[in-house]
Image (cartoon, rainbow, N blue to C red):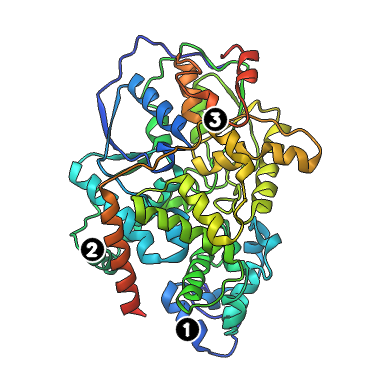
Amino acid sequence: MVQAESSSLEPVAKRVYSYYPGCSLHASAKEFDVSAKLVCQKLGIELRELEDWICCGASAAHSTSHLLSLALPAHTLKQAGEKGLPLAVPCAMCFSRLRITLHELKKKETLDLVSRTLEKELSTDVTVESMLDVLANESISLPVTKPLERLKVACYYGCLLARPPEVIGCDDAENPQTMDRLMGRLGAEVADWGLKTSCCGAGVSFPRLDIVLKLSHRILSLARSTGADCIAVACPMCHANLDMYQKDMTAKHKEKTNLPVLYFTQLMGLALGFSPKELHLDRHLTDPLPMLREKGLA
Amino acid sequence: MLKSTAIILGPVNDFLSSVQSHTGQSITACYQCGKCTAGCPSAYAMDITPRQIMRAIQLGLKDEVLDSSAIWLCLSCETCSLRCPREIDIARVMEAMRHLSLSEGRRPAQKDVVTLYNSFLQQVRLFGRVYDLGFGVAYNMRSGHPFSNVTRLPGLFARRKLKLAPDRTKGASEVRRIAARAKELERMRT
């Protein structure tokens, strides 16, 4: 078992970030926003939300117009650059679009074209970090009051926090460890499994639910087979696909699918002493509370 | 290393050259090992596989590529690009094929997928951000499946997953300006 770290340690220095929640965190993934903010506050990390931020364009821009897929995130990068603070981004989709845009803007021809699109001078002098990387930083001490003992977590990174690894900054695109190590520091046991970075079906649930059901069911089944009590995610789209359709899967496979899917920040929040209510654990379609009560965590 | 040399040469053709210059990817380097398809999560649902897309481009079979369901069922997961032993960014090529298919005004083999993207971007132009309920309604109406997902609504409201009103941001006008300008510049370039 991992020993909970001492709570007497004060945060070393105040860390301040600009914050880009993205559309999901203001709506269907509100619990990710709420839990990320609580955890940051507890760890002495200040988040300053960008004013009047706009959507990153997500898969829709990326699949229909290359220039639009760069121009929308470039607007956010411009805003962040003006603040002079690193940008923290919880949503894996927004993070991926912002990082890829930043990478593409390093080519002069692209920088010129996107600058002409925005009619603004752009620079690449801005840092974009995923909330996972912000919080998994091992120089931040974790004042754990309720270690996640007896809880086995299957960490799921999905596509967007893994690929392309050289742009995203992923430690190992086939078997990443960042979230696993973080969960370990909170006292949880982590599952060693093979679908950490396999696609859940992404955004096609409206037109092709069959594909989402097939891919997400495979992920849930393998996680369950390792003895995991829940899956931890850092992406609202993965969360929706894995959490929302478990009843459909139960009906389709005539075998109960019931595996809670939590944001990694909600699990951090529990370990740091916040209540299920504060962490909005009642917002999931697959109710995690019975399992958490059984483990003495709720 | 043979990296920059074509391993399997089909006849030189305009489609192959234009895809290569447009994407910066060396399609001729593909030696058809099939690793892209082996790792592709949606290949099972495609009419032709990612490996076959690469071969079709080498052979200049433009219609087979641009009218395939494969380019629309690619989930942009990038597993193919990560694992390609020839270091071809296959996901980037699939993306470029979607854009080309749209710019030529072709009828997409998965038209609901395109409707999904258009409905999403419509919300972004309207509000600057995606409004989930508006997005769902717009998709249902445009795709001709008006009752799709309707039975999920009570559950989603009970879990507070859906907001009744969109976020309002001053950024909305900025999005409209950027979208119009991107369209104009892309038209000028093609």
Disc 1 marks which amino acid?
Ser
Residue at 79% from the left image edge and 42% from the top image edge: A253
> Mark 2 and 1 residues: CB-CB less than 8 Å, in contact?
no
x%, y% of residue A263?
51, 31
Asked if residue A210 can be seen in this view, the reply is yes
Label 3 element class: loop
Q: Are marks 2 and 1 on the same chain?
A: no
Considering depth in this image, is B1 or A249 the residue closer to the camera?
A249
Asked if residue B31 can be seen in this view, the reply is no
Q: Chain of mark 2?
A: A
x%, y% of residue A106?
29, 60
Q: Seen in the image, is A274 located left or right of residue B43?
A: left
Inter-mark Cα distance, 3 to 2 = 42 Å
Disc 3 marks which amino acid?
Arg
x%, y% of residue A34?
41, 27
Disc 1: which residue: B17
Inter-mark Cα distance, 2 to 1 = 28 Å
Label 1 element class: helix
Counting every numbered tag in the picture gives 3
Considering depth in this image, is B13 or A217 the residue closer to the camera?
A217
Q: Quadrant of residue A141?
A: top left
